[in-house]
Image: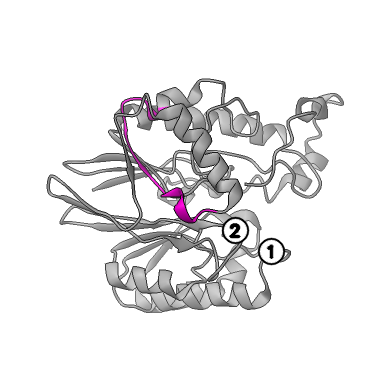
Amino acid sequence: MRFVPIAEESLGVRSVAMYVETHDLRILLDPGISLAPRRFGLPPHPREISRVLELRRVLDHYLSLSTHVFISHYHRDHFTVPYESIYMGTGSDTYVNVYRGKVVLLKDPKDLNYSQRRRYYGLLKAIRSIAREIIYADGKTLEIGSTRVVLSRSLPHGPENSRTGRVVSIAIDDGDLKLLFMPDVQGPMYQGAVDHANSIKPDVLVIGGPPFYLSHVFSEEDIELGIKGLAKIVGGGYLEKLIITHHTLRILEWREKLSEILSLASRKGVVVETYADLLGRSEDLLEARRKELFETEPPPEDYLELFRGSREDED
């Protein structure tokens, strides 16, 4: 199996896009790239805008290789939207190259909150005539040649009964390596997500860790649940590699916050990496550094005009 990180917070954007290839399957996981419309009271810095466009080109390359696309849920950093957006580096028809001719594995809309369901219907309207096939993923198992694909049942985007939505994870097993991709489970905070990981027993786990910066959304108890959930998985004795992603890396001091997990992983012989590590790059946490960048690299006086009328919600 070959897996290639494409875009993510350690590379300077909001995303978890990854390309996975086996003998039988070429799939793009969560083909979205986005930026926080506001962080520290500021819009994206010019460096962030440039990075979105740069990584969009990388995404396009791997989409040209892919036969399948997987969408875990409908926050806009996880799928390419069918409209123009400065925050996502999209034009009005960017989405066509993402979904045209692809088998698209989608999160089922039946248990979504209002905002995600609205985005789902907008996406479905745009792609149903151009996708090769649309499959609702929740709870399904697919055999593609000798590759086995296991989709989880719907999981909360955080703790049980979370208002932030629902997600689906995907496990890919080619007989030599088993990879589990669990975005936005926020730790995981939910015991059912821990149980699912323990049932899959992946060699490699790509997971959305605790969202330390979202203290206005999640309680200290929720964050602690996320750390404990991750510890249960790392302590399971099956992991070779843990790839920490996404919300966790929206603060500079994320390693200190996850020191318990890093220590446990070291004792268990589990390698902990980020997308940047996998690519042999230094972390470039542009969102976490946004305030600093506006101070050290101030944009032109008329720069903020770019965002007038373009404000979008966080996800």
Do callouts 2 and 1 mark residues in contact (Cβ within 8 Å)? yes
Circle 1 sits in a helix, a strand or a loop, which is it?
A: loop
Dot 1, crowdedness within 10 Å: few (<14), some or many (≥20)? few
Whether residue 13 is situated above or below residue 169 in the rendered picture? above
Whether residue 246 is situated above or below residue 98 in the rendered picture? below
Q: In the current view of this chain or complex, which residue is farthest to the right?
A: 301
> Taking the image as drawn, is residue 11 in sight?
no
Q: Which residue is mark 2?
A: 164
Distance, label 2 to label 1, CA atoms, is: 9 Å
Q: Position of residue 237 (x, y in %)?
A: 31, 77
Whether residue 30 is situated above or below residue 225 in the rendered picture? above
For the record, the magenta segment spans 98-112
Instruction: Please indicate whether residue 222 sits to the left or right of residue 55 in the image.
Output: right
Q: Which residue is mark 1?
A: 217
* Residue type beneath disc 1: Val
Whether residue 144 is situated above or below residue 126 in the rendered picture? below
Residue at x-position 76% and y-position 25%: 306
Residue 227 vs residue 145, the one in the foreground: 145
Residue at x-position 34% and y-position 78%: 236
